Amino acid sequence: MSDMTVKTPWHLWAIAAVAVFWNGYGGYDYVMTQTGNAAYLAQFTAEQRAYFDSYPMWMEAVWAIGVWGGVLGAVLLLLRNKLALPAFLASLIAFAVSVVYGQMSGGSALMGTTGMVFSGLIFVLGLIFVMYSRTMIRKGILR
């Protein structure tokens, strides 16, 4: 297969665009929350903001890995680089850890039904990005 040029399918660009947009918003959310942007944080209750502020340092690191791993995976997918898979996988695992932490610390209840639905969407899209990257590696699209 090294002698042949593998054509990039149109759907790679579509999935990569969705990944950049979705994970880019995650990066925006992370930066706005971490910098304490008052206008952005106004959408949350005082209890929710206090919960975010109470994260232990290790949870801050998990959150950063989840967010920036997704952004990196999206960029690497655009570049047709097979390292997109481990980046997306690290992001998904970090997200799973954050969900467990949220369940154990009461954060999930604090975020309510909307938070639960949004977490489900994050998980499904993260899983799609992982599976898609793995498929594109197997097909020789990502190198």
Image (cartoon, rainbow, N blue to C red):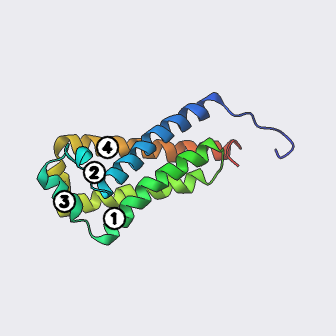
Q: Residue 51 carries which label?
A: 3
**Which residue is located at x 30 percent, y 53 percent?**
33
Q: In which quarter of the image is residue 141?
A: top right
Marks 1 and 4 sit apart, C-alpha to C-alpha, by 20 Å
Does the rendering let one see residue 92?
no
> Seen in the image, is 26 located left or right of residue 77?
left
Q: What element carries label 2?
A: loop
Mark 1 or mark 4: name the one nearer the start of the chain. Answer: 1
Q: Is mark 1 on a helix, strand or loop?
A: helix
Q: Which of 21 and 93 is in front in this view?
A: 21
Marks 3 and 4 sit apart, C-alpha to C-alpha, by 20 Å
Q: Is mark 3 on a helix, strand or loop?
A: helix
Whole-percent x, y for residue 13 in the image = 60, 33
What kind of residue is marked 2? Answer: Asn
- Residue that badge 2 annotates: 37
- Residue that badge 1 annotates: 60
Q: Residue 120 carries which label?
A: 4
